[in-house]
Amino acid sequence: MRIARHHATAVLVADVASRLDMGLLPPASMLQEMKSAMRFNFINQLELKRILVTAVTALRSKGIESVLLKGFSLSRLYPNPNLRQFGDIDLYVGIDRFHEACTVLRSLPGGYNWGEEVDVGRHYNIEFGRFPLEVHRESADVTDSEEQAVYTEIERDGLIKYPQHVDFEGFDLVVPSKELSVFFTFFHAWHHFTTSGVGWRQISDVAMTLHAYLGSQRSSTTSTFDVAKLHKWITEMHLMEPWQVFGWLMVNCLGLPKEELPFYDDSCRRKAERLYTRVMAEGNFRRHSHFKLRKPTGRVQKKTHSFVGIFVDFFHLAHIFPKSAFRGLKTALKSGFSKNFQKK
């Protein structure tokens, strides 16, 4: 349970443990703790559902259609949606009507914001009690300028041109296309790994998304998932090696059938084992950096902290993904120098 909590999968593990045979059940105290975690997550989801339906309805009243990302969008792909842990709502509204959408959602009862939306990056937070609602004008951060251009087209394809309408307990919701659901879920896990540490929840999300869309395709006579489009996106974003290494874990640790993982490569086992060690050590948002300096205060200290941090990130990534590490280092240095030049 300690490990499960670090990976945001405690409720999923608790559900399985509580259904074991009598002789294999956990001690009574732990079993009670597991049931409390499941109950708490269920109550959270009820409140999040209320906020979600209220927000989407308010936006539609102004002619703004939003696309649901992560959270509920992924939980519906699990056998029991109540077992997927999350604590916020992500709604993509795009750039054109972003400010109007923020104004509408700020006016909802109980909504609290920390400042003007012009001051934020890709999304703006509005808090309803302890539940944040993130209003996205962009679905993801992409620092490389070439990859940003590619991702903009990917985002337009899956969120604007070909989104899905799904039934959410009698309420119509819009979610990303099948191809973008798979790609974005993986890209989000990859972003966690390269920044704050990735847990098994994110990897499980990718596996469950693949199982939902490619598993159903295996039993269907008509092909509805565009594997060629997914291949194009992964290749253009320079993510094929990470995809295959993470994929090895999904197949060999989580039980995803090989047929449901496009571009599977068994030869990446050694890198996958290194990734497994890293995932188990870090967990969800548990990155343990060796870069331990006091919080910088002066201008020179901040610059030094940032510069050294770039190389710490490089070595952190290069142990498993050297190509991605060198590309990230090049982007980080280029971005840093260009910002300094613009300031001067």
Image (cartoon, helix red, strand yellow):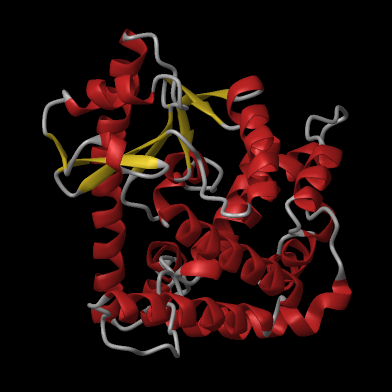
In the foreground, 81 or 122: 122
Residue at x-position 22% and y-position 36%:
116
In the foreground, 305 or 275: 305
> Where residue 165 appears, x then y in whole percent?
56, 21
> Where residue 255 appears, x then y in whole percent?
70, 66
Q: How many marks?
A: 0
**18 sits left or right of 204 in the view:** left
In the foreground, 135 or 9: 135
Residue at x-position 81% and y-position 52%:
235
Residue at x-position 31% and y-position 39%:
124
Q: Quadrant of residue 8?
A: bottom left
**281 sits left or right of 27 in the view:** right
In the picture shown, does residue 56 fall above or below 12? above
Q: Quadrant of residue 155?
A: top right
Q: Quadrant of the C terminus?
A: bottom left
Q: Is residue 201 visible?
A: yes
Q: Is residue 84 visible?
A: no
Q: Quadrant of residue 9?
A: bottom left
In the picture shown, does residue 287 fall above or below 123? below
**174 sits left or right of 100 in the view:** right
Q: Residue furthest left?
A: 110
In the foreground, 68 or 220: 68
> Where residue 259 appears, x then y in whole percent?
84, 54
Q: Quadrant of the N terminus?
A: bottom left
**89 sits left or right of 161 in the view:** left
